[in-house]
Amino acid sequence: MVQVTLEVNGKRVSHEAPARMHLGDFLRDQARLTGTHLGCEHGVCGACTVLVDGAPVRSCISFAVACEGRQVTTIEGYDADPVMQRLRAAFTKHHALQCGYCTPGMLATSRDIVLRLPDADESRVRVELSGNLCRCTGYMGIVAAVMSVLADLRAQPDDAVQALRAAQLQGHGAAPVMEKPVVFAGFTPTMAAPAAEGAPVAAAPEAAAAPAGKKEGRGSQIDGGFQVPFPADQVWAFMVDLPALASCLPGASIESHEGDRVKGKVAIKFGPMAAAFNGAARLERDDAAMRAVFRGAGQDSLSQSRANGDITYQLEALSPTETRVNVNLLYSLQGPLAQFSRSGLVQDFVRRMIADFGNNVTARLRQPAGQGEPLAQASFNPTAMFFSVLWARIKRWFRRGD
Ligand code: FES
Ligand code: FES
């Protein structure tokens, strides 16, 4: 984790963030400025465009830490901007948005065009806008809006806009195409340390959680764990018994089971997200190290989203009667549900699930299978879970005092 301090829309913003967090996530998740939209997160669609020191930048491919000390302008920061006032009115007049997802990026790029290219014709405007994609394909209205602002300013120059153009020329050179690229400051990489900030959402059993992040190329990962008051051998025997294990995972059910392979279903409901993933998984275990990887993949028949995930857990004997189970979840979502995969609420939700899983394991170990009633599936109250996670998060926001 590193401390990142920026000037965002004229205000100093300072937060701890993972060194690999991009500027778009920093603005949305840390600074709570959700007007910056993330589309492709590959630098292709332009939805995430913000200004850094006055120049348009893809916030999805700029590290937040590399922008240390810079001035960042997001769509929330243009209220007093004379060009943006004209563009907003023109976008409205020319019906230049449908769903509006591309609009913050389109407006940031359009503002740059109006300032840099006062004499641009339609084909030049189209070329300049070609780095911003509109999935509603509303390009006619967008181009017409930019053209109308340029025409208005040619017909009746505006002193405030002229002043901005002069400042733009000073900042970025006289050529219509930006000649001086923004050069980001270097930074010293730091080891990601387990942070107090990712404080456990749940209480008992202990559910310490490291900050969630993206493991390069493989999806998002979350570290957590729990402690159970039983010897490691006993916990290990339980943790490699797949039906017993599944009975502790809220929303999971096994349909068939053969050795270390299972087929089944995981039902998830959290706020707007509801899915039932049907799939298969296998357990790879290392009995000597008391470490196992549960690899699974499944598909939600409703949204056609696909999920892949590895749950790695390793036991650590803390004492002859106390064991810690360290859990690492590495997952990726493709399809419509992918938009939820890295939101802060979902990360908190998964941590809460790990904590609940630990509670269930403790309860099951206290009442071993084969003695008395068969193990029932752990119950799951999605509404209570949603509101408890939301409440924990709200409390954290207020504690941070920003
Ligand atoms: S989200 Fe940044 S370019 Fe698409
Ligand atoms: S208006 Fe929907 S993506 Fe452009």
Image: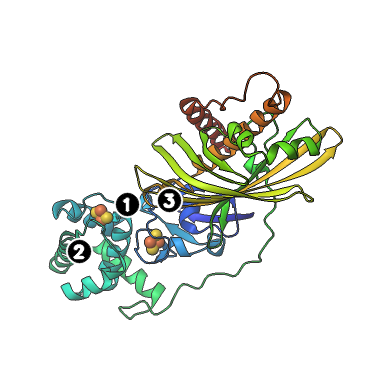
Contact, mark 3 vs mark 2 (Cβ under 8 Å): no
In the rendered image, the residue lying farthest to the front is 258
Q: Residue 105 sits in which quadrant?
A: bottom left
Mark 3, residue position:
306
Q: Is residue 350 visible?
A: yes
Q: Which mark is residue 179?
A: none
Q: Residues within 10 Å of mark 1 (few under 14, many from 20)?
A: few
Q: Amino acid at mark 3?
A: Arg
The answer to which of 296 and 26 lies nearer the viewer is: 296
Q: Amino acid at mark 1?
A: Ala
Residue 262 percent coordinates (x, y):
55, 44
Q: Nearer the viewer, mark 3 or mark 2?
A: 3
Q: Nearer the viewer, mark 3 or mark 1?
A: 3
Q: Amino acid at mark 2?
A: Val
The answer to which of 248 and 24 lies nearer the viewer is: 248
Residue at the image point whose x is 25% and y is 63% from the top: 159
Mark 2, residue position:
146
Quadrant for the N terminus, please: bottom right
Residue 20 percent coordinates (x, y):
57, 60
Choose the circle earlier in sequence order: 3 or 1.
1
- Dot 1: element: loop
Alpha carbon distance from label 3 to label 2: 40 Å
Query: Looking at the image, is 334 positioned above or below residue 189?
Result: above
Q: Nearer the viewer, mark 1 or mark 2?
A: 2
Q: Is residue 49 visible?
A: no
Query: Looking at the image, is 336 positioned above or below residue 357?
Result: below
Q: Which mark is residue 80?
A: 1
Residue at the image point whose x is 68% and y is 49% from the top: 292
- Dot 2: element: helix
